[in-house]
Amino acid sequence: MTPDLDPELDLVLTREMNAPRELLYACWTTPEHLVHWFVPKPHKVTACHLDVRPGGACNTTFEVDGAEMENNGVYLEVIPNEKLVFTDTYTAGWKPAPEPFMTAIVTFENLGGGRTRYTAIARHRNAETARTHRDMGFYDGWGTVATQLEAYAQGLK
């Protein structure tokens, strides 16, 4: 289920979560859920438009320290309850983005008993961009978000 990883280009976070994959997937694909956990608190999502299908929009806007940050992209692959692949390389209508940053691959592996192996991969176009993302705090930020996702999903059970 996990693609070949390149240690120069790919940053990977894997967690075993105490929530079923169907619920975690719903949290990723439903704007009403995503706004509650998608950025490390106290930052917040201020807008979210998801058209969860290959070529569909994956647009979020964050407020970070009083500044608005738009993150617009498209889904490349969608396998319900198993895998989401999205990128900011393109925007809706397959329009190239002026400065792409990464492609994300998120997988949900059923471990049984309502538990899921959650893997998030941030794949970058070059080693410099991957280093920049790592130095920006990929592991702390995405780790915090994974913890928030699990807690939010547990509250929905």
Image (cartoon, rainbow, N blue to C red):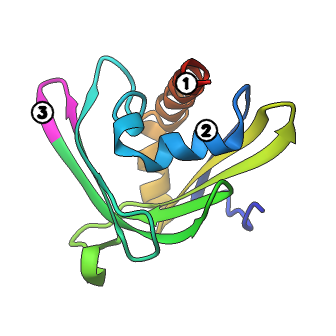
| Residue position marked by numbered label 2 in the rendering | 23
Outermost front residue: 157
The picture quadrant where one finds residue 135 is top left
The residue shown at (65%, 54%) is: 81
Do the numbered discs 2 and 3 sit on residues whose CB atoms are within 8 Å? Answer: no
- Residue 99 to residue 67: above or below: below
65 within the magenta span: yes
**N-term mark: 1 or 2:** 2
**Part of the protein shown in magenta:** 62-68
Q: How far apart are marks 1 and 2 (CA)?
A: 8 Å
| Residue position marked by numbered label 1 in the rendering | 156
Q: How far apart are marks 2 and 3 (CA)?
A: 31 Å
Do the numbered discs 1 and 2 sit on residues whose CB atoms are within 8 Å? Answer: yes
- Residue 154 to residue 1: above or below: above
Instruction: Give the side of residue 51 with respect to residue 116, left or right.
Output: left
Which marked residue is nearer to the observer: mark 1 or mark 3? 1
- Residue 59 to residue 150: above or below: below
Q: Is mark 1 on a helix, strand or loop?
A: helix
Three-letter residue code for mark 3 = Ala
| Residue position marked by numbered label 3 in the rendering | 67
The residue shown at (40%, 38%) is: 34
4 within the magenta span: no
Instruction: Give the side of residue 77 with respect to residue 41, left or right.
Output: right
Residue 29 seen anywhere in this rendered image of the structure? yes
Number of other residues with Cα within 10 Å of mark 3, as a class: few under 14, some 14 to 19, many 20 or more = few
The residue shown at (27%, 28%) is: 44
Three-letter residue code for mark 2 = Leu
